[in-house]
Image (cartoon, rainbow, N blue to C red):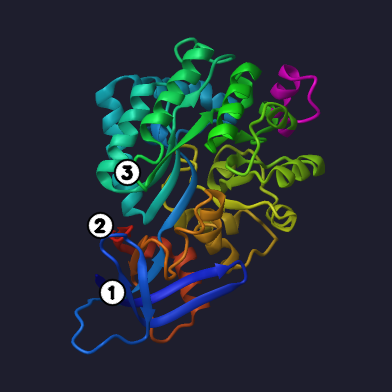
Amino acid sequence: MITFKSNILQTLNKNEINFQKNIYITIDNESGKIVSISQNIPANTHYLDYSKYLLIPGLIDTHVHLSQYFIRGKQSPSLIDWLNKYVFAEEKKSQNDQYAALVASSFFKDMIKSGTTTASIYTSVFKNSTDIAFKTADKFGVRALIGKVMMDCNCPDFLKEDSKKSFDESVELFEKWNQKTKLLDYVFTPRFAPVCSSKLMKKIGDFSSKNNAFIQTHLSENWDEMNWIKNLFPENESYTDVYFDNGILGEKSILGHAIHLNKREIDLLEKSQSKIAHCPESNFFLKSGKFNWHKISQSGIDFGLASDVGAGTILSMLNSMKMASFRQDLDLIELSEIFYSATLGAAKVLSKENLIGSIEIGKEADLVFVSGFNLEEKTGEEILSELVYLWNEKQIYSVYVSGNKLL
């Protein structure tokens, strides 16, 4: 057993901030689970004293591109232009094992330093780069869902895959890595409908349904992309309909962006129990549009925050929380709801709310200790406000995943 003394800040629902000072948290070393949370412990019990630090649940990134990590900050006027000018050429480099390993190592080091303990990750179309990403995630001890990007049409020849090979390689990676350890999952990753044939999407949907597998893709990020969809799939009423008809939607489907949705599309997502990854900084960076936070929240669709590196410029989910607030212009989003969307709400998006996302007995100990706060004189609301808006003045001091110290 290992025991910490610290000050817990978390949200157990969208509407409440839970702040507890001088709390003892005991973790079972073998299972990595929290077995006790108390204001007192027996006399002479050894504990690690983190009482000067703020303790928050491990932060969760619901949508991020590992293979784009080295092209952050490359500005372009729109999504499609940015993909063609920077992204596709960069992802091609991951065909090289040494380069893929360098990117993966840099990515996971910085992910841990940012306080992110779990991420849903896109790599490239190359099987080797995904295999290397899994090996590196396992080495660093992070919790991750990782998938090989799939593209079999309407993309550069140097990335275009044979449909059968794309699917077969993804299944091979699924069989090798999915739940190989309790920290790793495979997620089928068709990049987005314009570059995936219906044949490929249907095979992904069928396999995922039969094997309870995760799917991640992009939806309604940009108007040019949506017009492209209309030309490619004229028989479908909407972008969301394309995914619905091809079996991509479902309770383990994570859809990045989902900015420009009509009522029917929202109803389809809710009915299918699909999830949304909201990428506030990326939406701003590529001038894609504004996420309709209130409408999606009221719909009942589960959504969580995401960094969306490389259109996002930094892996910090604290930055994503700040950007989520700023991007709503005149609409006030309560900080409790924003914090929830990077912790327990994000865990729900990844179907892991029973494991992570909050600091509770029976859950795995994914913990982040943060320094730079005057904890004695401030309320939980004031501390959370500083965490979100002054995050770059604070320091991620220590990070644990399933009770194992990573930083």
Q: Which residue is mark 1?
A: 4
User: Crowding at label 3, few (<14), some or many (≥20) Cα neighbours within 10 Å?
Assistant: many
Residues marked 1 and 2 touching at CB (< 8 Å): no
Q: Residue at x 47, y 78 (%)?
A: 19
Image position of 380 (left or right of 365): right
Specify which label sits upstream in the sequence, 1 or 2.
1
Q: Earlier in the sequence, mark 3 or mark 1?
A: 1
Location of mark 3 (residue): 108
Residue 407 marker: 2
Of residues 298 and 330, which is closer to you in this image? 298
Separation (CA) of disc 3 from disc 2: 12 Å
- Give the residue displayed 30% in from the left and 61% down from the top: 403
Q: Is residue 314 above or below residue 229?
A: below
Please tell me which residue lies in front, 31 or 167: 31
**Secondary element type, mark 2:** loop
Look at the numbered disc 1 and give the secondary structure of its residue.
strand
Quick one: quadrant of the N terminus?
bottom left
Residue 18, position in %: x, y? 51, 76
How would you classify the magenta stretch by its main secondary structure? helix
The type of residue carrying mark 2 is: Leu
Q: Rounded to the nearest whole Å, what is the CA distance between mark 1 and mark 2? A: 15 Å
